[in-house]
Image (cartoon, helix red, strand yellow):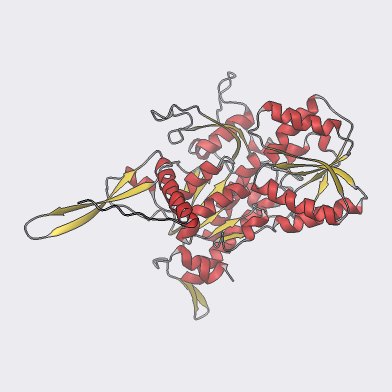
């Protein structure tokens, strides 16, 4: 006799179950580890063993370093990607390297590459310090999010376990690859995606550049921290700036993302209180079809407002400025958010001459420039990211007939990677590393007889780093 049981789910419970199923399926598709238990028994005993099954293809880190304790990093080292068409009946073809099978990369962001090297530099500096974590070696696993939430999610999953252990001759699941903390991402949407994954594991996340005010909500992002102010304050300041110059008729453009939409919403509320009128408000992304970019550009050309407030990511504004350059209109005064107002690749457009906004204070990091320029051919060849950077910077990829031979002079190269004259966000990365290092130091080290002694064999959990230090 069968029994029919009816279960009535509330909307919240239904949404929760759907989210759980979606997360599990996404986790499997993005290279996660699935644990299965096999029971084997004989006449006397029964033992359980845990096997690991690798689902999908893991994304190998861009940079790695072994250490007693590992810190994760995520930076959008590429700002444009083209997804490959899939028929969903077979795995996509491998296109880039040996581990990434769904994305074609284009346009390396050399400034973000510099940010990733700043993280490595700070960790190397701490490892050589006699005052901070003496005798303890920090390591890192730095991933490239490609300015893409799915890629950021894939990196986040890999911070929670060790998919590389599957390539060893073992079937035992390991969490040895789990990081104590994560630095990044620079983008707010990517940071939100990462926080949703690593937050339930109590892994603290410190972003040097994610400014969305939404990330200040500790009920949703309890383990998220940042070394840069929230956009709430920037939006108020931008409205005051526009009011100060007497500009009461403006147009606005924002990235269609958490960063752009939330930032512009805050600005528009503040502008309304200041008596500023808005002629148009447009949103764009770098992935929009060309006709959408053309439409936004035409709105700007035909507008009577001569002031444009742009709350955008650099890559999004880039495609719009390229379109505007094709058919220039009367000069306009651009007001920029911190994401692009000091970005050298954006400011090269003549349209942006005279752009104003609020920037993160610049600083100097002793020894950092020498660290950046210390790239031997062996170091470059060992990293697919540095190899791509090198070939692009010196135009020696081989396709044009010239092959890189190691005689290229990095000292003479002038781009965002080698430019250390205005270290702004780079310093925020540097501070983020030191904040995490001090948290670990607090847990491992004690001062005994005027000497600092650290126990590098002590097992500590991410929740300790989060609760016992970073929250204070």
Q: Is residue 445 left or right of residue 287?
A: left
- Residue 391, quarter of picture: top right
How many numbered marks have been drawn onto this rendered protein structure? 0
> Is 404 situated above or below 121?
above
Q: Residue furthest right?
A: 246
The answer, for residue 377, to whether it is visible in the render is no
Q: Position of residue 300 (x, y in %)?
A: 82, 34
> Picture coordinates of residue 396 (x, y %)?
59, 26
Instruction: State the residue lying farthest toward the bottom.
Output: 449
Would you say residue 56 is visible in this rendering? yes
Which residue lies most toward the left here?
A: 43
Q: Residue 30 at what x, y percent from top left?
A: 43, 42
**Rendered position, 45 above or below 311:** below
**Residue 174 in the image, given as x and y percentages of width and height:** 34, 54
Who's the residue at 70% across and 46% down the image? 260
Q: Quadrant of the C terminus?
A: bottom right
> Front-most of 385 and 371?
385
Could you say which quadrant of the image residue 69 lies in? bottom left
* Residue sitting at x 39%, y 43%: 28
Residue at left offset 60%, top offset 19%: 400
> Seen from this angle, which residue lies furthest top?
401
At a point 37% along the width and 55% down the height, the residue shown is 7
* Front residue of this view, candidates 135 and 99: 99
Closer to the camera in the image, 252 or 460: 252
Q: Left or right of 283: which side holds 391?
A: left
């Amino acid at each position: 006799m069968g029994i029919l049981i009816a279960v009535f789910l509330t909307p919240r419970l239904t949404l929760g179950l759907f989210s759980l199923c979606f997360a599990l399926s996404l986790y499997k598709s993005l290279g996660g580890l699935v644990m299965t238990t096999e029971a084997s028994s004989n006449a006397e005993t029964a033992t359980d063993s845990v096997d690991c099954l690798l689902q999908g293809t893991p994304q190998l880190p861009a940079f790695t370093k072994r250490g007693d304790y590992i810190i994760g990093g995520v930076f959008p080292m590429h700002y444009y990607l083209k997804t490959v068409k899939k028929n969903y009946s077979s795995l996509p073809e491998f296109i880039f390297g040996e581990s990434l099978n769904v994305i074609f990369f284009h346009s390396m962001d050399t400034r973000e590459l510099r940010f990733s090297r700043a993280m490595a530099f700070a960790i190397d500096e701490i490892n050589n310090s006699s005052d901070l974590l003496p005798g303890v070696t920090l390591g890192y696993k730095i991933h490239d999010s490609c300015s893409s939430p799915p890629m950021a999610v894939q990196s986040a999953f890999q911070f929670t376990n060790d998919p590389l252990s599957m390539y060893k001759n073992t079937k035992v699941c390991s969490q040895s690859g789990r990081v104590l903390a994560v630095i990044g991402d620079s983008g707010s949407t990517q940071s939100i995606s990462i926080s949703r994954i690593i937050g339930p594991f109590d892994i603290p996340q410190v972003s040097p550049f994610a400014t969305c005010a939404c990330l200040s909500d500790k009920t949703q992002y309890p383990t998220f921290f940042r070394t840069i102010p929230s956009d709430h304050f920037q939006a108020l300041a931008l409205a005051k700036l526009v009011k100060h110059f007497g500009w009461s008729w403006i147009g606005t453009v924002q990235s269609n993302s958490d960063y752009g939409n939330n930032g512009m919403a805050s600005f528009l509320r503040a502008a309304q209180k200041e008596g500023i009128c808005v002629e148009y408000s447009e949103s764009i992304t770098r992935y929009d079809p060309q006709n959408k970019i053309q439409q936004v550009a035409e709105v700007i050309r035909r507008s009577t407002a001569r002031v444009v407030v742009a709350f955008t990511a650099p890559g999004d504004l880039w495609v719009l400025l390229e379109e505007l350059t094709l058919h220039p209109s009367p000069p306009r005064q651009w007001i920029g958010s911190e994401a692009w107002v000091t970005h050298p690749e954006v400011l090269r457009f003549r349209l942006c001459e005279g752009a104003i906004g609020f920037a993160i204070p610049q600083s100097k990091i002793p020894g950092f420039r020498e660290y950046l320029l210390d790239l031997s051919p062996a170091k470059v060849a060992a990293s697919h990211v540095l190899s791509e950077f090198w070939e692009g910077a010196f135009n020696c990829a081989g396709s044009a007939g010239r092959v890189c031979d190691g005689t290229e002079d990095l000292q003479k190269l002038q781009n965002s990677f080698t430019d250390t004259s205005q270290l702004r966000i780079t310093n925020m990365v540097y501070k983020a590393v030191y904040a995490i290092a001090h948290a670990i130091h607090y847990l491992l080290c004690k001062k005994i007889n005027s000497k600092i002694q650290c126990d590098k064999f002590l097992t500590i959990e991410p929740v300790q780093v989060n609760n016992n230090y970073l929250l204070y």
